[in-house]
Image (tube, helix red, strand yellow):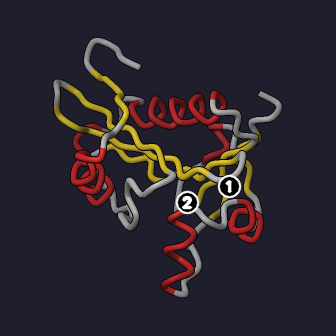
Amino acid sequence: MTNAQEHIRLAQSGDRDTVTRVFHEAGLDTDATLAEGTTYWVMERGGQPVGAIGLEHGDGVSLLRGAAIIPAARGGGLGRRLVMSAIEYAQGRGDRAIYMFSKGGDWGTFGFQQVPLAVVMGEVPDAPQVQAYRSRGERPGGTTWMRDLSAS
């Protein structure tokens, strides 16, 4: 996806530091970034990274991993473009749903509905983010969400 200023491109293995930095600047967890079984994208403006997003893939479902725009680039709808590009990708790969953990924001504007934590943990048990929480003996904080893609 592109416009006159921004470009969203598939992240490569060499983009790990870039994605990690963008997530870190946004205050997001960076464990298992670009792990096997994931797809990430980098948003660039003028050749400089300003955002990143990822999906951790399960069996017919994905877990949204980080939707981050660096603070200096926020407020212009870039985050919305990143999220929608990930949703479109998940639909294209045939996922029936996307799940996510969130510590803030109204994800209902993206078609997500709140669901119990057990649903998310059960649907994507092998996702790197879920495995990281389990290995640390932690529960994700915040709210858990799902967007049904089967009706789209």
Which dot marks residue 102? Answer: 2
Give coordinates of residue 25: x percent, y percent: 26, 56
The residue singled out by tag 1 in the image is 145
Which residue of the protein is positioned furthest toward the left in this rendering?
A: 47
Alpha-carbon neighbours of circle 1 within 10 Å: few (<14), some, or many (≥20)? many
Which residue of the protein is positioned furthest toward the front in this rendering?
A: 36
Could you tell which of marks 1 and 2 lies nearer the N-terminus?
A: 2
Residue shown at 25% from the left, 18% from the top: 5
> Can you tell which quarter of the image residue 15 is in?
top left
> What kind of residue is marked 2?
Ser
Horizontal side of 91 relative to 96 (left or right) equals left
Residue 129 visible to an observer of this rendering = yes
Residue shown at 66% from the left, 46% from the top: 98
Residue 71 visible to an observer of this rendering = no
Horizontal side of 100 relative to 44 (left or right) equals right
1 and 2 marks in contact (CB < 8 Å)? yes
Residue shown at 38% from the left, 53% from the top: 34
Residue at disc 1, secondary structure: strand
Residue at disc 2, secondary structure: strand
Q: Specify the quadrant that holds the C terminus.
A: top right
> Can you tell which quarter of the image residue 100 is in?
bottom right
Which residue of the protein is positioned furthest toward the right in this rendering?
A: 151
Horizontal side of 145 relative to 28 (left or right) equals right
> What kind of residue is marked 1?
Trp
Is residue 107 shown above or below 77?
below
Q: Specify the quadrant that holds the N terminus.
A: top left
Which residue of the protein is positioned furthest toward the top in this rendering?
A: 4
Is residue 67 shown above or below 42?
below
Residue shown at 65% from the left, 53% from the top: 58
Residue nearest the observer in this picture, 151 or 105: 151
Horizontal side of 120 relative to 86 (left or right) equals right
Give coordinates of residue 126: x percent, y percent: 61, 65
